[in-house]
Image: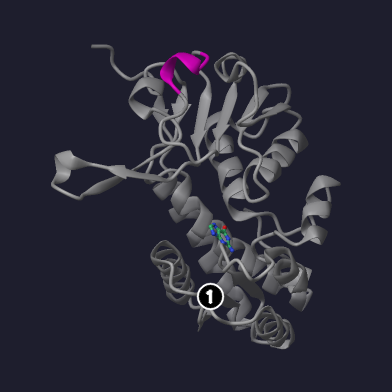
């Protein structure tokens, strides 16, 4: 059997080094009298969201942040949730606000996102931040965490100059697909956004020097879709049955058939320990960036 040719992009290690930069920035801010503050709001009790929110809070606390988790019942009204966001907007001890998605169906997520002060919007979902990213105002935008983390992984593999490379993003969500396409465009890649209606998706992906898979479909991208030597960033986190681990057990797989793609790609992220750890590291990075900007202090580089 062929040996995997791809080098593995170690998201855990790279996230660890980002976290060290965050820690240094957080220590410097704290010494200046500003403790970075992150508030994470969880509405309802979705088990996956509970895990994500707990991890965010734990990481923030471990970095010495003022870390607040606010749990509200799924029955909270939109008006009450808006009032909570406004309280956090006004709270001087809070520099980053994250309302965990998805929200219950009676709450309009865009109303909540648009209520968050853009300079505290550490998810980068507010239309002001989306617009700043689209117009190239990186110095004032807060950039969504998973796309920002994906770009750092690409830089790790290929270096800072990726101008002229062909990038194919699979998925067009506001959280990953669209912002990562903007970031690749800013780096002068030739960018294609593919999605569920794309014709000949394998043929489109075969053109790509950089593939970012963010569709949420387990092992959709097969090995023979990958151009030899391409860089593959797998944003997927799909839980599938794993009877080999015992009855009722599951495991996480990406949107890419890793074992196949690793035979062809130049660089590839694993799942888990690829993009996942970067998302949380970039949330911490965005929080110290927000705290620095609000205080009028120089911001760290990531
Ligand atoms: N739910 C899944 N991913 C995210 C994220 O990045 N931010 C928020 N707020 N909710 C999410």
In this view of the protein, can residue 297 be seen by the observer? no
> Does residue 186 sit above or below 264 in this rendering?
below
> Does residue 108 sit above or below 4 in this rendering?
below
Which residue is rendered at x = 59% and y = 26% of the image? 210
> Does residue 259 sit above or below 107 in this rendering?
above
Which residue is rendered at x = 57% and y = 69% of the image? 104
Q: Quadrant of residue 263?
A: top left
In this view of the protein, can residue 206 be seen by the observer? yes
Quadrant containing ligand 1 reads bottom right
Q: Is residue 90 magenta?
A: no
Residue segment shown in magenta: 222-227
The residue lying toward the viewer, choosing from 301 and 205, is: 205
Residue 66: image x %, image y %? 54, 82
The residue lying toward the viewer, choosing from 5 and 34, is: 5
Task: Looking at this view, name the residue that lies furthest to the front.
Answer: 106
Q: Which residue is mark 1?
A: 43
Which residue is rendered at x = 44% and y = 36% of the image? 269
Which residue is rendered at x = 45% and y = 35% of the image? 255
Residue 31: image x %, image y %? 60, 82
Residue 260: image x %, image y %? 36, 21
Residue 244: image x %, image y %? 15, 39
Q: Quadrant of residue 82?
A: bottom right
Task: Looking at this view, name the residue that lies furthest to the right.
Answer: 135
Q: Secondary structure at mark 1?
A: strand
The residue lying toward the viewer, choosing from 298 and 283, is: 283
User: Is the CB of mark 1 within 8 Å of ligand 1?
Assistant: no
Q: Is residue 134 left or right of residue 283?
A: right
Tell me, what colour scheme is on the image? one colour
Total numbered circles: 1
Q: The N terminus appears in which quarter of the rendering? A: top left
Q: Is residue 14 left or right of residue 125?
A: left
């Amino acid at each position: 059997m062929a040996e995997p040719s791809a080098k593995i992009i170690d998201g855990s290690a790279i996230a660890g080094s980002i976290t060290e930069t965050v820690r240094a920035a957080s220590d410097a801010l704290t010494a200046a009298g500003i403790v970075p503050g992150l508030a994470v709001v969880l509405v309802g009790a979705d088990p996956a969201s509970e895990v994500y929110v707990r991890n965010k809070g734990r990481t923030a606390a471990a970095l010495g942040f003022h870390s607040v988790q606010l749990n509200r019942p799924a029955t909270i009204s939109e008006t009450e949730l808006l009032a909570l966001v406004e309280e956090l907007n006004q709270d001087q001890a809070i520099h980053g606000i994250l309302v965990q998605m998805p929200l219950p169906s009676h709450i309009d997520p865009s109303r909540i996102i648009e209520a968050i002060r853009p300079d505290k919007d550490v998810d980068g979902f507010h239309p002001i931040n989306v617009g700043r990213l689209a117009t190239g105002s990186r110095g004032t935008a807060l950039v969504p965490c998973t796309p920002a983390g994906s770009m750092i992984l690409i830089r790790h593999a290929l270096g800072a100059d990726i101008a002229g490379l062909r990038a194919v993003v699979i998925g067009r969500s506001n959280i990953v697909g669209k912002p990562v396409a903007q970031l690749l465009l800013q780096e002068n890649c030739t960018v294609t956004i593919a999605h569920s209606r794309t014709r000949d998706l394998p043929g489109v992906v075969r053109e790509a020097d950089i593939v970012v898979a963010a569709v949420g479909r387990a092992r959709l991208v097969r090995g023979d879709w990958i151009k030899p030597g391409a860089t593959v960033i797998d944003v997927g986190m799909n839980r599938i049955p794993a009877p080999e681990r015992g009855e009722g057990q599951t495991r996480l797989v990406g949107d890419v058939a890793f074992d196949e793609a690793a035979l062809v790609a130049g660089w590839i992220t694993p799942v888990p320990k690829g993009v996942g750890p970067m998302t949380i590291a970039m949330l911490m990075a965005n929080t110290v960036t927000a705290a620095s900007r609000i205080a009028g202090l120089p911001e760290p580089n990531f």
